[in-house]
Amino acid sequence: MQKVAAALAAMLVLAGAAGCTANGTPTTEGSPAAEGSSATATSSATATQASSDTNPTGVVSNGNYVHYVGIRDIVKDVSGLDGALKKYYVKYLDYIAPNGKPIRLVAADKVTDEQLLKAYNVLSFYLTNYQSYDKTAIANSMADKGAVLVLPNGADGDGNTPDEAISVGQPLYQLELPTAGSKWYQENDYQHRDASYEEIFHMVHDYGIGTTQNPGADPNLAKQIKAGLDSVLPTDKKDWGTKGIWGLGSKEWMQELAKEGSLEQEYIVSGIDSYYGLWEAYTESDKGMWGMYVPKNRAAVQQQDPKAYEIITSFLPANFTYMERIDPAFAGTFKMYLDTAEPYTYKSQYLQNVRLTGDGSSGVVGNDLDNILIGNKGNNSIDGGNGNDVVQFAGASTDYTITKTAEGVTVSDGKNRDGEDTLVNVEILRFTDKDVAVSDIK
């Protein structure tokens, strides 16, 4: 992917911008092993371990209670790693595939814990089974082949990271990894655009799914992606970069991709990025992926690249199902619904679950989905919006004072973990011992 990254870096210079992390589908296991893998998977962290933001205290007896990957799960002792991983990286997380082997994510010293967690959650999102699509073989293939995601400092092409540090895995750079709620995310700063979905899917594609040239665990999906690629490229290679709906303005880059066998990988991630709204706020072009992919949003992918739409919807859900962690520095109210006056919501509208981190008294407003929402240590305002929404707390129901109000409820933690939260349009309060229906509160 380094040749591809170098070509993209050149494109970004022309565009006047430089290229630029969050838990899998909720499960009761909640360890780094559990998200997106089989129920029998284990992890370097214990299966009952929760994040270090608002950890459950005492016995968790509520079968609906979900443990999410968190800062406590990050391993800070790298003495057991080999070679360049130990030399250049200071912390890691292991995603354990169903076969019990790790897919490792390692991070350099300037990469924040929240960025590493974001990367982990995106990987878990891609590897979580979806409807009848079983991704066990893909995850196992990645682990068998020793797939590693490396998170170096800086940006791709800045010359500050030795080749030795990035040749040991799929790179995703620190400056290409905005966490939700961060300044880069909220302001749609495309100099620090979110490359996590692209780069991590490259790893899933290369080490797991496979391509038509290098078959992997899912040759049928690889063939579908190749068919999608063929449908968007001009038949005559002389027209590459000027006609079709992908690769526009990028003929030399595409020729390089063809030589190294990476056309399929780069094509499908353009569709994924537009499908999940990552380019709709981009103001320098009316197209997606730096202006080289015609569809810019989900509706356009469906209309203009129907094969990509069919592929994406066959193995990925319509919304991000992991627990998105809002950056600790965020202040204000984070919106999970589309508000065109705040263009970051082109992305956040596709989030299903959100947790506030840090200790600020921030807020969140849900969308029409059945959201799971978690506050932080501050006094939070949480509006579930439509849907059947859950707010999860760190302790047992007996630790809290619950007061019915005209608009909803207030929930006050007597043990200084969750603060005092004001809730509206929330249907379920989830504690470690039981769920409480708001409709039953007198």
Image (spheres, rainbow, N blue to C red):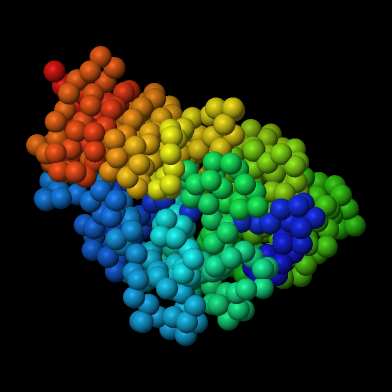
Residue 326 or residue 428, whichever sits in front: 326
For the N terminus, the quadrant is bottom right
Q: Residue furthest bottom?
A: 83
What number of labels is visible?
A: 0
In the image, residue 403 sits, relative to residue 128, either above or below, namely: above
Along the line of sight, which residue is nearer the eye, 106 or 421? 421
Q: Nearer the viewer, residue 168 or 344?
A: 344
Quarter of the image for residue 331 reads top left
User: Outermost residue, left direction?
Assistant: 398
- Give me the residue at 40% from left, 70% from top: 91
In the rendered structure, the answer to whether residue 241 lies left or right of residue 164 reads right
Q: Quadrant for residue 421, please give it.
A: top left
Q: Is residue 11 above or below residue 82?
A: above
Q: Nearer the viewer, residue 361 or 99?
A: 361
In the visual, does 381 lie left or right of 293?
Answer: left
Residue at position x 29%, y 35% in the image: 379
Location of residue 259 by image quarter:
bottom right
Where's the C terminus, which quadrant?
top left
For this orientation, the residue located farthest to the top is: 406
Image x and y of residue 438, in percent: 21, 24
Residue shown at 51% from the left, 69% from the top: 150
Q: Residue at x 15, y 50 (%)?
A: 57
Can residue 302 be seen at all in this image of the molecule?
Answer: no
Tell me residue 68's x, y (percent). Answer: 31, 51
Is residue 200 depicted above or below 158 in this figure? Answer: above
261 versus 48 height, above or below: below
Query: Outermost residue toward the right?
Result: 238
Q: Is residue 194 visible?
A: yes
Give the percent coordinates (x, y) of residue 286.
75, 38
Query: Where's residue 121, x and y in %?
Result: 42, 54
